[in-house]
């Protein structure tokens, strides 16, 4: 069999119509029956190239076939009924192929139901952004998910629950209410449970910060939890304790959604860390005394040179480009 797809990607949750799904299953069976048939291989390649959605449908069929492998020898009513099917007037070899195809279609159909976001198991889906990118994703339940720069999430939906793993970066969640399926975000040692709300979760090097824009969330750590209401923020450290998040209002904490960074008296060292998230550069601050200087202002995330120039205008520092991807900020002794 031609195995050109190994795993499902972000696009693989796109809705696929029944006709396209049936075509994908037919191709899967045809290629399994005749893996060395050059004519079939060419026709299959033409079918894939005709529509990007064909590739998605085929990846779904492959993934579900692989997952159902363990069940193909087990007995259950749908499979047994398919295997008992005997078309009249067919030669034995043709009947065997049709029987095999009927059973396989039943299994794949079960797999599609099991793996759907409302199914028993659910199929995880990953989303990610690169440096300087943002992405908005509409999830199957109506929840809206916004990813900030350099962010990765993994979405797990099934018949009983909805949860998202934040692997790295920052995401804003506008959750669709569903009393039967609670919505949770897991990141590091902490989980955030939605109680009908919109909120921001930011995974930093040594902490997880949560800012609630609307409604209420429950933030649970090791053996304890906190309830946050609209306008409140809280952080949870890697050593598993709650503490106050960096002082800022919710508008500042979520300004990235408009392509902005907003600083209200933030340490220069922290400001440079935030700026570097959006650009493929290393920004160094050799003099530790400069780290405690305070920065105020609004900056466009995509304008690296403008941001650094503004910092140099506000503070007694100069900006030195020492390489293609390395920038150093140094003290300027006579600047006030």
Image (cartoon, grey):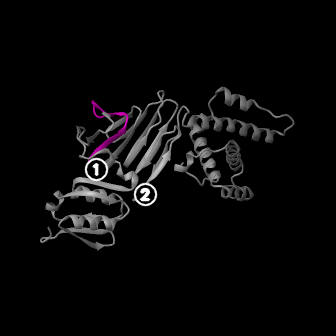
Whole-Å distance between the Cαs marked 1 and 2?
A: 20 Å
Residue under the point 17% across and 67% down = 316
1 or 2: tag closer to the N-terminus = 2
- The residue where tag 1 is placed is 205
Number of the front mark, 1 or 2: 2
User: Residue 99, relative to residue 76: is it above or below?
Assistant: below
* Left or right placement of residue 9 versus residue 37 in this view: left
Residue 98's quadrant in the figure?
Answer: top right
Relative depth, front residue between 119 and 109: 119
User: Residue 82, relative to residue 7: is it above or below?
Assistant: above
Residue under the point 61% across and 42% down = 65
Residue positioned most to the right: 89
Classed neighbour count for the residue bearing mark 1: other residues with Cα under 10 Å, few (<14), some (14–19), many (≥20) = few
- Residue 9 in view of the camera: no
Residue 101's quadrant in the figure?
Answer: top right
Q: Which residues are magenta?
A: 204-227
Classed neighbour count for the residue bearing mark 2: other residues with Cα under 10 Å, few (<14), some (14–19), many (≥20) = some
Magenta span: predominant SS is strand
Residue under the point 54% across and 37% down = 117
**Residue 145 position in % (x across, y down):** 45, 45
Residue under the point 69% across and 28% down = 80
Q: Say what secondary structure mark 2 lies in.
A: loop
**Residue 22 position in % (x across, y down):** 70, 43
Q: Say what secondary structure mark 1 lies in.
A: loop
Query: Is there a contact, CB below 8 Å, between mark 1 and mark 2?
Result: no
User: Residue 233, relative to residue 270: is it above or below?
Assistant: above
Give residue 155's mark: none
* Left or right placement of residue 50 versus residue 296 in this view: right
Give residue 133's mark: 2
Magenta highlight on residue 213: yes
């Amino acid at each position: 069999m031609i195995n050109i797809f190994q795993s499902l990607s972000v696009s693989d949750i796109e809705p696929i119509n029944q006709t396209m799904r049936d075509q994908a299953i037919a191709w899967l069976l045809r290629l399994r029956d005749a893996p060395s048939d050059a004519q079939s291989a060419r026709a299959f390649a033409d079918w894939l190239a005709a529509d990007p959605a064909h590739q998605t449908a085929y990846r779904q069929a492959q993934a579900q076939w692989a997952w159902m492998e363990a069940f193909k020898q087990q007995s259950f009513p749908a499979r047994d009924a398919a295997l008992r099917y005997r078309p009249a007037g067919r030669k034995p070899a043709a009947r065997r192929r049709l029987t095999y195809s009927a059973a396989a279609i039943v299994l794949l159909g079960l797999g599609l139901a099991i793996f759907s976001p409302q199914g028993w198991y659910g199929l995880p889906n990953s989303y990610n952004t690169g440096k300087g990118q943002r992405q908005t994703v509409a999830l199957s339940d109506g929840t809206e998910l916004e990813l900030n720069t350099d962010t990765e999430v993994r979405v797990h939906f099934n018949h009983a629950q909805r949860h998202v793993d934040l692997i790295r970066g920052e995401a804003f969640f506008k959750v669709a209410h569903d009393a039967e399926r609670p919505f949770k975000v897991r990141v590091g040692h902490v989980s955030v449970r939605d109680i009908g709300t919109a909120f921001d979760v930011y995974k930093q090097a040594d902490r997880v910060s949560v800012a609630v824009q609307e409604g209420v969330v429950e933030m649970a750590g090791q053996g304890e939890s906190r309830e946050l209401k609209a306008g409140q923020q809280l952080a949870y450290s890697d050593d598993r304790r709650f503490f106050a998040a960096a002082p800022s209002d919710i508008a500042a904490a979520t300004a990235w959604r408009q392509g902005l960074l907003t600083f209200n008296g933030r340490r220069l060292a922290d400001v440079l860390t935030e700026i570097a998230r959006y650009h493929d550069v290393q920004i160094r601050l050799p003099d530790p005394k400069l780290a405690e200087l305070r920065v105020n202002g609004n900056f466009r995330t995509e304008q690296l040179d403008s941001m650094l120039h503004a910092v140099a205008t506000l503070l007694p520092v100069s900006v030195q480009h020492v390489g293609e991807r390395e920038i150093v900020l140094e003290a300027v002794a006579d600047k006030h």
